[in-house]
Amino acid sequence: MARTLLAIYPQSARRYDEMLAPDGTVRPHWQQFFQHLDQVSPEEMHQRLDFVDRRIQENGVTYNIYADPNGADRPWALDPLPLIISSEEWAEVSAAVAQRATLFNAMLADLYGEQTLLADGLLPPALVYGQHGYLWPCRGVRPPGGVWLHHYAVDLARSPDGQWWVIADRTQAPSGAGYALENRLIVSRVFPEMFRDLHVQHLADFFRDQVDGLSALAPVDPGEQPHTVLLTPGPYNETYFEHAYLARYLGFPLVEGQDLTVRGDSLYLKTLRGLKRVHVVLRRQDDDFCDPLELRGDSALGIPGLVNVARAGRVVIANALGSGLLSSGALMGFLPAICRKLLGEELAMPSVATWWCGEKPALEFVRENFDDLVIKPAYPTQRMDPVFGHELKDAERDEMLRRIEARPHAYVAQEMINLSQGPTWSRAHERRLLARPVGLRAYAVVNADGGYSVMPGGLARVATGASARIISMQRGGSSKDAWVLTDGPVSEFTMLKPSVGVRELVRAGANLTSRVVENLYWLGRYSERFDDSARMLRVALSRIVEAGGQKTPAVEAAMALALHLGVLPKPEEDTEVTAGSEHVLLEAIYDPKQPGSLAGNIRNLMWSATHVRERLSLDHWHSLNRLQRDQQAAQKRHPSMSEAIAFLDRVLGVSSSLTGFAMDNMTRDDGWRMLIIGRRIERLTFLARMMSSFLRMEAAKAPGAMEWLLELADSIITYRSRYSRLPELLPVIDLLVFDDSNPHSVIFQGWALVRYLNRLLRDLGDERGDKVTEAIVKLVAFPLERLEHHPIAQHQACLELADLLSELEHAANQLSDWLGNRYFTHVGDVSRQTMAV
Amino acid sequence: MSEPVRYHVLHETRYDYGSPVSLSQQQLHLSPRILAWQQVEEQRIDLDPAPTWRRDAQDAFGNPVSWVAFHAPHEMLFVSSSMRIAIMPHLPPDLEESLPWNELRDRLAYDASAPTPADLDATRFLFESPYIRVKHELAAYAADCFPPGRPVLVGTRALMAKIFKEFKFDPEATTVATPVLEVLANKRGVCQDFAHLMIGCLRALGLAARYVSGYLLTRPPPGKPRLIGADASHAWVSVYSPGSEGEWVDFDPTNNLLPDTEHITVAFGRDFGDISPLRGIILGGGGHEPEVAVTVTPLDEEPPRPVAVADSPAIGKLATEAAASDAIADEIAEPAEPSLAAPNTPALEDEPAPVTSRQ
């Protein structure tokens, strides 16, 4: 038996220790867990840590860092040891959090209504009218049920005497509840016996209360079911992972502003099947970005007209627009009196001592006690890091004081608190506990009875160093699960539906938004397009390598075809196509700025994929990532011809795995069908254009050219197995145009497109005059015998066949436009502001 | 002195989008508000095309506001707002009698007691707002106009005069988004910029000031008839001065005068953003700027005649179209006296024609 973990666990005289009592013994509610931990072998603990890391990676749990130029995603940091809280203690904390949520809701009702708090002098106007977070257009807007605050988070810390204090309030769009849930799912599996034996309260009831609470408020018309969406600012937001995760868990569609539209007094979701009314918007987007018509007009993120829908009482916006102003730390000092006035009771949990510098006496106090205070912005919209008074030297200190005195109402000063510490598992040692400062973010949601339910536990956060005073996930902190114990039975309710797994790529039966459908369609097209252009570029490069620098007819024909297919840019007038072919081809591979280049196609592919990321499997996503990394790495090196060919080989390998994911791993719903239609349209137009251009090119009919045409259409194996002779015009055309068993023939792709399209239209109850079928029928009727005869007649026949192929290509392009107009949002067509004086 | 002066105002805005706009929503602050000294006898807003949806209401500052939505594709939007207004003289009798400015400042600052309703109301306009960041440079600029103990309205008049003297009217110098500090540095701008600047200075001193949008009667050169469409919307400042009639007193820093019967108030707010006449969000369309034409006609003066504005063909075209139906009236009016006496603003008779906003 190794020595106990306590042997080198540092106690602190300056901090409250969550696990240890002042006499060095383990607190009662930690004992069972500590004993278990003390007995786990290093090897087993190692495995458990591996499990944590693997789960985080597999589930794609990330936290995006704005300032990080090297890609947005950083894996979420989780310490496997939970923060354990006893049931008696939690009962008090929980009641205090619920009271505070109730109080804040009453304050919002007052400030956006009668404003008695201002009239009575209980709150300075500067903290209401002086805040950009006070949204004037929302004054007088009464939300359904009189609920402004639907979800609320509060950062708690424990002082050395064991008392819990409120450090900060989050009333805008509090984040972290989803991460808390993910932490729970992982940590409860790291210590399954402990989780069961300790009677840890489950989180699912909390989320059910949230769903029920929102549904109860939904302003439905007779016969309607409440329809709730989760509004995200998009994949570049720091907590996008959480938005996607919660949306899936709660069963709400994840939408962006452009997915929603206002018509008259109502809000609608644009779906593949038309407009569908939305009753509740759970928003993770800051309120001033929510309606460019009446709020900030400089952003394309919002939903024009949303405030008017709220005004009409036709939508629940959770939280109500304008609720962010209560996040101001400057309010804290005024809360006890406000609580007495609005709720008729004492504030249950104190806020950390806070002085708003806008009051003269407070300003004087701050000046005199500067060294003991932390200076923070008074308004949440202000960007400023907390400043520790004692850290400022003479000049800096004077400058800070001068700034405060110039605009005293913009600053608050807070007492510094020594956060409590809790045990974390050291990854640098084989078997060691470290003591780290911890804080707890607790959550409350409005429930169906109109009261507030508090999440049992929350997101515990851990500072990086032993002496840190600030805990922030943006500054590299870590997190913990929080276990609230109970003496009674544990609720077994679960929201996890067994059928929903990470590997399920598209949710069947969900409301597919038009934006998702459009991005899936383009994901399909770009996947195919980059495959086609990689193949074309490989053919051309190989011909050049074979020709050893000579301008052979094969090289010229390949370059001309690449030009026709848009893989190479149109040359300036008076320059030869083949001039510097090598250079032109390398640019067409690696230069993302060049139109039609492979690198550009990869970038477009990534763009589409990013916007449907929650629908792609992790493997699928990894393949895409690898592709982009490869391309970026190669771009920097000035690769040689042979390196370029090797790169194209790798790209084509990735491409076939993408095809595999699309065909084998995705649920066959409308979204998938749209992706496949995108692929078919892309391949059909490519093949049709390839063949028509080829047929019109005189030089191309040399025997060598025929061979690379087969290579380009990936059909050389089939040809050889059938004819075992050098390629000739008639059989090549038959194989690449007419053979409906060859997946790389025009006819095969054409009929496949028609099949998928008809199925989609039937599902959607839609119809369309079918030009594609018409063009295929005409093509099939072409008498192949005409290609047997003497050269002049043959040439004429080739031109006629080329026209038929062009007709089909045109029909497919028209279909693409029609799909866009009929089903998609104008994603490229962003709303913009107009202004006249 | 208590005879009202009556006006007809026509404010026309035309967007030619160039390509179809599939969805459009607009917020209109075009209907004038009723004030103690301003009666609205008649007012209407006409839209072409007709909107799919419309709601009329009051905004949070008590201004009339309309929201309209267009759901069908359209390539053009024409908004015509016309009104008949009667304005009573309302100049403050004596600026010297207002409160010392520092006394008023201290009274508006929070001290944990209940404010008077009027003071509380004024604090809505005491702090910075999206278009008016309150910076200490602004307080410094205004400092010499406000020595301790000076009556607030006297100080405000001095500040107005200072801005008028030091700043040059220049429609090319700024855009709607030009920050106040940049205006202060370059000493150029239009009425909006001067109003924002002056409000910023007053707020930086701890005084309450609001932004007023409206119209201004412009004077044709002597002997010349009034031109249709030659005017523009205008903006000025109102400062809180409890004890004065109506508690608020208007100042026009662009023209260095106290607005009386020649300024027609449409709306007031914290800054331009609260009450911009026509603010919208469109999906689609090209990138064309709107054409705006404003005509202010005193109703006891001869009707104006349509004349194209030389440097603005678009406005000339608009004006001609808009005036077509008045052509007969114009012909009849032609032989009348060339120029009637201007309404009662003796102090301004010899001043150059007032200038208004950018067009």
Image (tube, coloured by chain):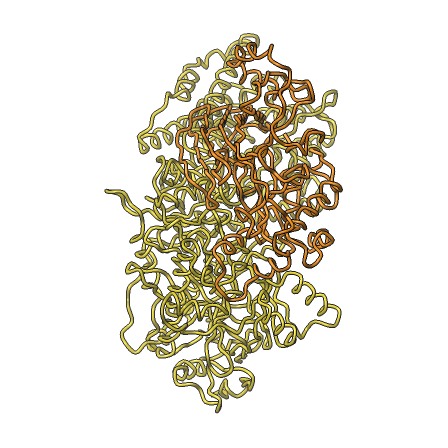
Instruction: Give above or below for B50 relative to B150.
Output: above
User: For the view shown, which residue lies furthest in the bottom direction?
Assistant: A23
Residue at 45 percent of width and 83 percent of height:
A38
Q: Position of residue B166 (x, y in %)?
A: 76, 42
Q: Is residue A662 visible?
A: yes
Left or right for A701, reference A717:
right
Left or right for A525, reference A89:
right
Instruction: Give above or below for A484 relative to B302.
Output: below
* Chain letter, colour orange: B
Q: Position of residue A225 (x, y in %)?
A: 27, 46
Q: Is residue A704 visible?
A: no
Asked which quadrant contains residue A262, the reply is: top left
Quadrant location of the C terminus of chain A in the rendered image: top right
Residue at 49 percent of width and 41 percent of height:
B36
Q: Position of residue A205 (x, y in %)?
A: 31, 64
User: For the view shown, which residue lies furthest in the front direction?
Assistant: B1
Asked which quadrant contains residue B179, the reply is: top right
Left or right for B252, reference A714:
right
Closer to the camera in the image, B10 or A583: B10
Closer to the camera in the image, A363 or B291: A363
Instruction: Give above or below for A46 relative to A544.
Output: below
Residue at 44 percent of width and 14 percent of height:
A782
The colour with which the image depicts chain A is yellow
Closer to the camera in the image, A217 or A245: A217
Q: Count how many numbered circles sit on residues in the image.
A: 0
Q: Position of residue A508 (x, y in %)?
A: 34, 44
